[in-house]
Image (cartoon, rainbow, N blue to C red):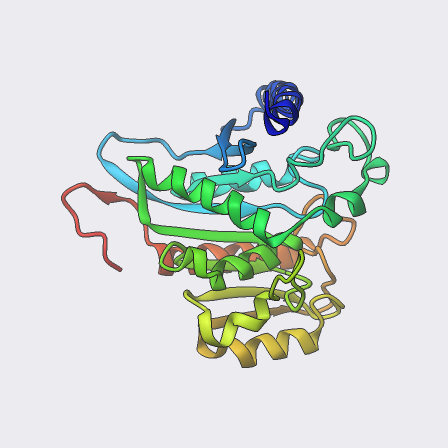
């Protein structure tokens, strides 16, 4: 048995236990989605919360990849409900777990049933590498493209905090050219940093490689991204970036599980996000209709 298989099997068993617990939790909370595992090229299952609108058997739907923030997708129901809300609005929503390589029950607990302060958030964040993020994104997108209920040419991405950075990364990645049609970044920090040996910062590619329109939600008193970061991103992206600034809002203002959550700003950001996604991705399309926007 190879070293890879020896490593993957215990990890797969641990993740299966996680999914079982979380799916029980989904039933108790009356959430509409469920967890699936998409196997990536390295043999890891990428745990993904999948939430769908009702399918009428004829129409195909746009899809949105939702990218989590530093506490992951298990600690609180906020992101699962956010995916469900997108599904209510007619989008297939998928919420992948980008920390799936490092969760364990001792050093980097996944947050199920424990307070945020007991999570090793820095350990999880420190594990991220842009190459592995891209592997997981390609895995998820490949699954969406094969789904007959989805408009494969209308896939968008939306992320919070570290997920906002990943939204930017997706919008400029050579590997995803032609795959991502819209990106929404909620207070996405560290856009000017690359993760992993030799990785370019997403911002380094914006001027030459930005492939889709971006909606950026920024807190006016946030320090990462700061107002200076926002101005630089606008300069690099030009007309492809639509900037929304929320007075007195700090980092995490749109995350309902954050101590810095600001309901009025989050509600306005949600309204603007839906407007942007409908403009860029459209709505359901029947089989006989054209799919061009």
Q: Quadrant of the C terminus?
A: bottom left
Relative image position of residue 230 (x, y in whole percent): 63, 74
The furthest residue to the bottom = 235
Residue in the foreground of this view, choosing between 7 and 32: 7
Q: Residue at x 34, y 42 (%)?
A: 145
Q: Is residue 35 left or right of residue 76?
A: left
97 vs 170: above or below = above
Relative image position of residue 131 (x, y in whole percent): 57, 51
128 vs 2: above or below = below
Q: Is residue 228 left or right of residue 87?
A: right
Q: Is residue 9 left or right of residue 118?
A: left
Q: How many marks?
A: 0
The furthest residue to the right = 117
Tell me the quarter of the picture where residue 185 sits: bottom right
259 vs 16: above or below = below
Q: Quadrant of the N terminus?
A: top right
Relative image position of residue 203 (x, y in whole percent): 58, 70
Relative image position of residue 113 (x, y in whole percent): 77, 26
Q: Residue at x 41, y 66 (%)?
A: 211
The furthest residue to the left = 288
Q: Residue at x 57, y 72 (%)?
A: 204
Q: Is residue 114 left or right of residue 50?
A: right
26 vs 86: above or below = above
Q: Residue at x 48, y 61 (%)?
A: 171
């Amino acid at each position: 048995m190879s070293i890879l298989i020896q490593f993957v099997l215990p990890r797969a068993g641990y993740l299966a236990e996680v999914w079982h617990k979380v799916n029980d939790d989904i039933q108790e909370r009356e959430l509409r989605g469920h967890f699936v595992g998409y196997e990536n090229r390295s043999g890891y299952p990428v745990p993904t919360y999948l939430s769908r609108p009702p399918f009428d058997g004829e129409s195909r739907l746009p899809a949105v990849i939702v990218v989590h923030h530093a506490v992951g997708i298990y600690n609180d129901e906020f992101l699962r409900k956010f995916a469900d809300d997108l599904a209510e609005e007619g989008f297939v929503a998928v919420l992948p777990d980008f920390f799936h390589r490092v969760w364990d029950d001792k050093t980097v607990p996944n947050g199920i049933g424990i307070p945020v302060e007991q999570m090793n958030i820095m350990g999880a964040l420190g594990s991220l590498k842009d190459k592995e993020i891209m592997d997981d994104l390609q895995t998820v997108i490949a699954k969406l493209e094969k789904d007959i209920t989805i408009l494969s040419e209308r896939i968008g991405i939306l992320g919070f905090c570290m997920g906002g950075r990943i939204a930017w990364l997706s919008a400029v990645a050579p590997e995803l050219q032609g795959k991502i049609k819209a990106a929404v970044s909620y207070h996405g920090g560290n856009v000017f940093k690359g993760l992993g040996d030799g990785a370019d910062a997403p911002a380094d590619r914006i001027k030459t490689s930005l492939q889709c329109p971006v909606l950026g939600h920024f807190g006016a008193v946030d320090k990462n991204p700061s107002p200076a970061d926002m101005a630089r991103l606008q300069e690099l992206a030009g007309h492809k970036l639509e900037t929304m600034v929320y007075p007195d809002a700090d980092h995490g203002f749109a995350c309902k599980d954050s101590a810095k959550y600001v309901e009025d700003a989050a509600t306005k950001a949600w309204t603007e996000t839906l407007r942007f996604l409908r403009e860029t991705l459209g709505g359901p399309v029947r089989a006989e209709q054209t799919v061009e926007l």
